[in-house]
Image (cartoon, rainbow, N blue to C red):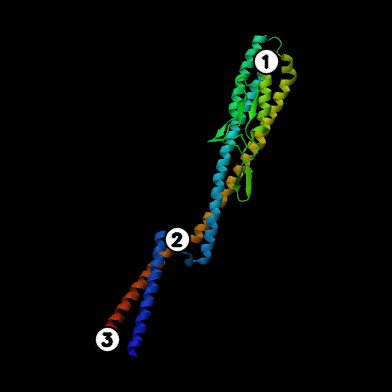
Amino acid sequence: MVRVTERLLVDKLLGNLQANSEKFDRLQESVSTGRRIIRPSDDPTGSVTSLVLRSNNDELEQAQQNIELAEGWLNATDVALQDISSILQRVRELTVQGANETLSEKETQALGNEVDELLSHAMQMANSRYGDRFIFGGFNTRSLPFEFLDSAKTGWQYNGDNGEIERSVAPGVRISINTSGDRVFPQIFDVLIGVRDDLRAHNQESLSLDRLDELENVHDDVLDALLSQVGSKGSRLDLLKRQLTALHLNNTDVLTQVEDVDMSETIIRLNAQQAALQAALATGSRIIQTNLIDFLQ
């Protein structure tokens, strides 16, 4: 009966030593990793909160990447349309000069040749890229959106579509990042070809009566695209970026509170647990030695 009681005492001692050792190991692991929750069993509620916050942060980071992509696309669009605006302003100046009746046919032809060069540059802008994608082709971003029908540039064709490329830029928020080329460029090409041909043909009446109004209208369309498609979306992306940054910082702060340890408090607990473990080991050693001597006697 005595030996049964002593065996129970030893088993209880060993159980306590194991429990103290496990507590010490967990505290030591927390100090070394800086984490309060290392496995879900450490805090089931906190673990769920941590998973939700990390998932939210992943979504926010993806949205931030999409915003950067959208900004890059919009910036490329802005550069191209700003260039087109400059082209149209220059062509208007040339049209006003060409409509001056004091100019000779040879002089208006020279102006027409300059417009022809500007027409080529406009085609280059219509085929602008962002990375390896054409920005004005709608969904068709891999093929050349616009091309002339012949070397004389008497006509053109559009190879894209009017698709809108959307990106998720915030939870539940999607915006179109592109402007399809069929919205603006057809009118631009038609007007520039008309101005060039009238200048070369010395058709000053058409220049003064029709072409100036046409240039004004297409320039308004370009400015409208700059304001509505590029400017307003750019402003919205700036606002969303600030909101996402704030949300990400807030989530990170909460995540730190849920997952991370209070280092100074944990070190104090670790030292206390180490002292308790050492005391338990010392006590257990004496008990085991006493029982061993009793058993031998």
Q: Secondary structure at mark 3?
A: helix
In this rendered view, identify the residue nearer to me: 259 or 205: 205
Residue for point 41% across, 67% down: 269
Task: Specify whether residue 147 is in view.
Answer: yes
Q: Quadrant of residue 128?
A: top right
Q: Quadrant of residue 106?
A: top right
Residue for point 52% across, 59% down: 51
Horizontal and vertical percent for residue 159?
Answer: 62, 32
Q: Specify which label sits upstream in the sequence, 1 or 3.
A: 1
- In the rendered image, which residue does mark 2 sit on? 35
- In the rendered image, which residue does mark 1 sit on? 199
Q: Specify which label sits upstream in the sequence, 1 or 2.
A: 2
Q: Residues within 10 Å of mark 1 (few under 14, many from 20)?
A: many
Q: Quadrant of residue 234?
A: top right
Residue 252 shown left or right of residue 234 in the figure = left
Q: Specify which label sits upstream in the sequence, 3 or 2.
A: 2
Q: Amino acid at mark 3?
A: Phe
Task: Specify whether residue 272 is in view.
Answer: no
Residue 104 shown left or right of residue 297 in the figure = right
